[in-house]
Image (tube, grey):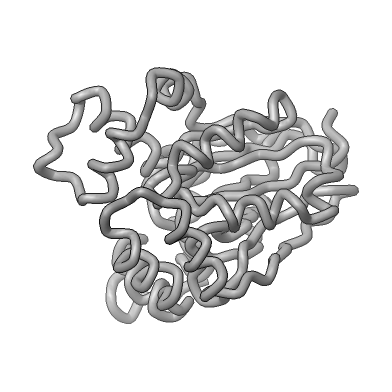
Amino acid sequence: MTSSVAVVSDIHGVLPALESVLAEPAVAEAELLVVTGDHTWGPQPTEVLDRLTALGDRAVLVRGNADRELLHLALGIDDAADADDLTIWGAGRLLPAHRDLLERMPEQVTIDVDGFGAVRFCHATPRSDEEVVLVDTRAERWVEALADLPDDVRTLVCGHTHMPFLRLVDGRLVVNPGSVGLPYGRSGAHWALLSNGAVTLGRTPIDPDELAAEVIANSTFPGIRAWVDDFLRSPATDLDALAAFGPRDGRTPGDATG
């Protein structure tokens, strides 16, 4: 039984944001660190993978859809004609050890956590690494997404949508820690802590301009300045993100959520 688990998600190759979160006392003191996917698709993908693996057995890494897409491009499974410039560049940066790591990385794990029992950690939902469910997604869709979970798993921790939330779904607790590297709605690097039966949603303040400058100085991505302007200096708001993601959670105009 693990006494405490810190959770981070959606780092997206933003190494300075990850370093800031790892320096948080609550994160550093947690018995285990679980990273729920999308470590890559960002300006420092291999650097983030190297930093996470350097944590050794204390870190449990789950593969996200962006990691899968980068790996498949690197292995020639997917066609580069369908990929964006950052994915193509990132796939080319993967060394054999990175490819092996991503191939071996599980899509979900279950860990017994003190005060919670069996907790399932995944990227998006237990049935898909890219399914969209939101804090305001209707309950019926949530129930469908969680239908295959064993009865004894009463807590789900996921990422993917870059917005932190807690929600109850038919007696199960759902936790989304938000994003470390590309948060929507609020600046800073977001994380969560499961300890003593309680969930803490944490946020590490980060100055966007300082973060942008550090990323530009340390990334070799040719389009880094434009990427930083789009994703670090002008991130989507939570309302923008909900509006964009909403049609992907199965709702129709006029649907009641809850």
- Left or right: where does residue 60 sit relative to residue 236? right
Q: Which residue: 40% across, 72% down? A: 241
- Left or right: where does residue 254 sit relative to residue 168? left
Label count reads 0
Horizontal and vertical percent for residue 14? 50, 54
User: Between residues 86 and 240, which one lies in front from this camera angle?
Assistant: 86
User: Between residues 6 and 97, which one lies in front from this camera angle?
Assistant: 97
Please determine whether, in this image, residue 181 is positioned above or below residue 52.
Answer: below
Please determine whether, in this image, residue 66 is positioned above or below residue 257.
Answer: above
Horizontal and vertical percent for residue 121? 60, 39
Q: Which residue: 33% across, 60% down? A: 224
Horizontal and vertical percent for residue 179? 55, 59
Q: Report the residue that reaches farthest toward the front.
A: 217
Answer yes or no: is residue 77 visible.
yes
Please determine whether, in this image, residue 11 is positioned above or below residue 89.
Answer: below
User: Between residues 41 and 30, which one lies in front from this camera angle?
Assistant: 41
Q: Which residue: 65% across, 30% down? A: 54
Q: Which residue: 73% across, 63% down? A: 202
> Which image quadrant is residue 150 in?
top right
Answer yes or no: is residue 144 visible.
no
In which quadrant is the N terminus drawn?
top right
Horizontal and vertical percent for residue 22? 72, 49
